[in-house]
Amino acid sequence: MTLVKICGISDPKHARLAAAYGADFIGAVFAPSRRQVTIGQGKRIAEALGKDSPVQLSPSVTVIEASLREKRPLLVGVFADQDAGTINSIADECGLDLVQLSGSEPWELNASLNRPILKCMKVRDGESSEHLLSHYHGGAILLLDPYVEGTYGGTGRTIDWAVAAEVAAKTPTVLAGGLTPANAAEAVTTVNPWAVDVSSGVETNGVKDPDKIRAFIAAARQPVAAE
């Protein structure tokens, strides 16, 4: 079953609702963004999820999935072009279970981080799966998001799902970009990703919408039948 990440959470009540609706991962953004949270907000989100300490994980999808069965959801901190010391410090202070790198960080940074990593790869129009995979160096789970100049994510744009499906067939992949309750089931059927990631697609007027969160999770868990 495809896992679900609800990202861009800044209000503890939305974290609790997403958890209650069955989200596997809750994402809090610590990078410059209109959804950016402070360390204090990050702590409050962790508290709302009942996290007294982070789950100790290895960067193995098998270990992460086993941990989800025992302590769902896991808390992901989203960073972009920040140094390892800052990321590790915030991860420790806020009790993050995983970190997501959404900037142009070098792969070498992975070795300096003390949490499992979701590594965002920005997909440009016309880019092939072979080209994307040639830049994958291991030590992280790939997250595919559309390239939009000047932004780190949450743009509402989709990527080529056929290309994403080819990548997902080779390595565990998180699919992001332009997902909504209306297209989540089709995305899961087409791409067969390890997980799907949504932020703007579950918002109304820029604010997380509980009804859309619930609908998205339900849709992602009920993929459409192949024609």
Image (spheres, helix red, strand yellow):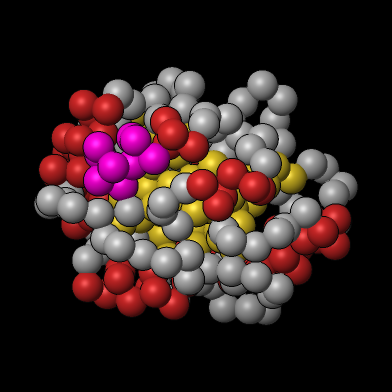
Q: How many marks?
A: 0
Q: Is residue 23 above or below residue 79?
A: below
Q: Is residue 177 visible?
A: no
Query: Residue 93, percent across and down?
Result: 25, 37
- Is 92 part of what is drawn in magenta? yes
Q: Which residue corresponds to the image point at 48% horizontal and 65% vertical from the top-left?
A: 59
Q: Nearer the viewer, residue 91 or 207?
A: 91
Quadrant assignment for the C terminus: bottom right
Q: Position of residue 102 (x, y in %)?
A: 57, 39
Residue drawn 75% across and 68% down? 166
Residue 155 position in % (x across, y down): 58, 32
From the top left corner, tell me how far across and down residue 161 is, in percent: 71, 58
| Residue 227 in the image: above or below residue 199 | below
**Who is closer to the viewer here, 104 or 124?**
104
* Residue nearest the viewer, comparing 188 with 43: 43
Quadrant in which residue 131 is drawn: bottom right
Main SS class of the magenta portion in the image = helix
Q: Quadrant of the N terminus?
A: bottom left
Give the side of residue 5 with respect to residue 195, left or right. left
Left or right of 187 on screen, residue 166: right
Up/down of 219 relative to 103, above or below: below
Q: Residue at x 37, y 48 (%)?
A: 76
Q: Magenta segment range?
A: 88-96
Q: Give 150 or 222, whichever is nearer the viewer.
A: 150
Q: Name the residue: 22% across, 66% down.
A: 71
Q: Tell me if 54 is positioned left or right of 215 in this view.
A: left
Relative to 90, is 123 on the left or the right? right
Can residue 98 be seen in the rendering of this structure?
yes
State yes or no: residue 204 in magenta: no
